[in-house]
Image (cartoon, grey):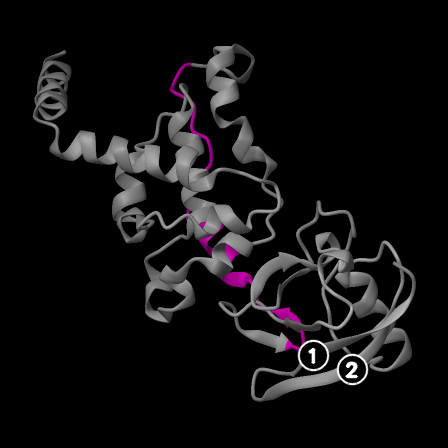
């Protein structure tokens, strides 16, 4: 594929109003969407606002929606589109627009602050932490998250229902709760918090978050579903319920 002229439709506007604008931009072999957005800034729209940093799929900054699908602009190759295809680039729909392709993602940082950090048991010093390799590997996948918030953006629980944002942490942060719950030394009751404080019950495991994750993290299968299973076992399994009651009773006598 050599150079050619591509048709782009880019959303321009702010938090009050905006619309899609048409552009024709040169495309060269090997380029990605972010390259074209930068060329558009350099040649036709110097005031176009876009957030980016590493251009290597590791900072999560350039999240947007390309032809309606949440993606990283730096990881979406132009070769995946035909030369006569009109490519639409819009800001993430779930978060308020600041200007053009830049959205206000502060919702995610607010949810992050609501989750208490790792809490080791009393009497265990940092140098005394010990984990089995199987426990390390179990949650290692979740640490690949680059905070692009594409999973948060595509989750219909908040995407289609603004009123849920207050009580639902979203897949990225429920994954964080699940990761902490899997840690054998974490002393906090993550299961109760997931259900009562972070809205785990809102998730109906449609896997849309997993589908858009640029790091290929199996958010639904490896974090959310196992977390739901542990919460349900604890609350409804009669054997688990009886065991919890007996454990609490024996503990209160000591």
Q: Distance from label 1 to label 2 (Cα)?
A: 6 Å
In the rendered image, residue 168, in percent from the top left (x then y), is placed at 35, 56
Label 2, on which residue?
Answer: 23
Quadrant in which residue 5 is drawn: bottom right
SS category of the residue bearing label 1? strand
- What segment carries the magenta color? 99-123
As rendered, which of 116 and 230 lies closer to the eye?
230
Residue at 52 percent across and 34 percent down: it is: 142
Q: Are marks 1 and 2 in contact (CB under 8 Å)?
A: yes
In this picture, residue 113 sits left or right of residue 214: left
Residue for point 63% across, 64% down? 64
- Residue 8, percent from left and from top: 74, 76
Q: Secondary structure at mark 2?
A: strand
Q: Is residue 129 visible?
A: no
Q: Quadrant of the C terminus?
A: top left
In this view, the residue in front, 130 or 150, is: 150
Q: Position of residue 33 (x, y in %)?
A: 76, 62
């Amino acid at each position: 594929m050599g150079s050619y002229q591509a048709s782009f439709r880019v959303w321009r506007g702010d938090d009050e109003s905006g619309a899609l604008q048409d552009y024709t931009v040169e495309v060269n072999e090997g380029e990605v969407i972010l390259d074209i957005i930068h060329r558009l800034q350099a040649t036709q729209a110097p005031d176009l606002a876009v957030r980016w940093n590493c251009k290597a799929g590791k900072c999560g900054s350039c999240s947007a929606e390309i032809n309606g699908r949440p993606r990283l602009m730096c990881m979406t190759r132009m070769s995946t589109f035909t030369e006569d295809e009109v490519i639409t680039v819009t800001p993430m729909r779930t978060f308020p627009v600041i200007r053009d392709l830049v959205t206000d993602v502060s919702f995610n940082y607010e949810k992050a602050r609501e989750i208490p950090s790792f809490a080791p048991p009393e009497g265990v010093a940092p140098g005394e932490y010990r984990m089995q390799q199987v426990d390390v590997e179990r949650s290692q996948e979740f640490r690949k998250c680059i905070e692009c918030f594409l999973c948060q953006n595509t989750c219909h629980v908040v995407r289609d229902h603004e009123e849920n944002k207050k009580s639902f942490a979203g897949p990225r942060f429920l994954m964080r709760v699940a990761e902490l719950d899997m840690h054998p030394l974490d002393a906090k009751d993550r299961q109760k918090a997931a259900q009562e404080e972070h809205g785990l019950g809102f998730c109906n495991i449609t896997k849309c978050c997993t589908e858009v994750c640029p790091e290929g993290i199996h958010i639904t299968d490896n974090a959310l579903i196992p977390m739901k299973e542990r919460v349900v076992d604890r609350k409804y399994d009669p054997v688990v319920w009886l065991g919890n009651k007996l454990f609490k009773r024996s503990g209160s006598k000591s």
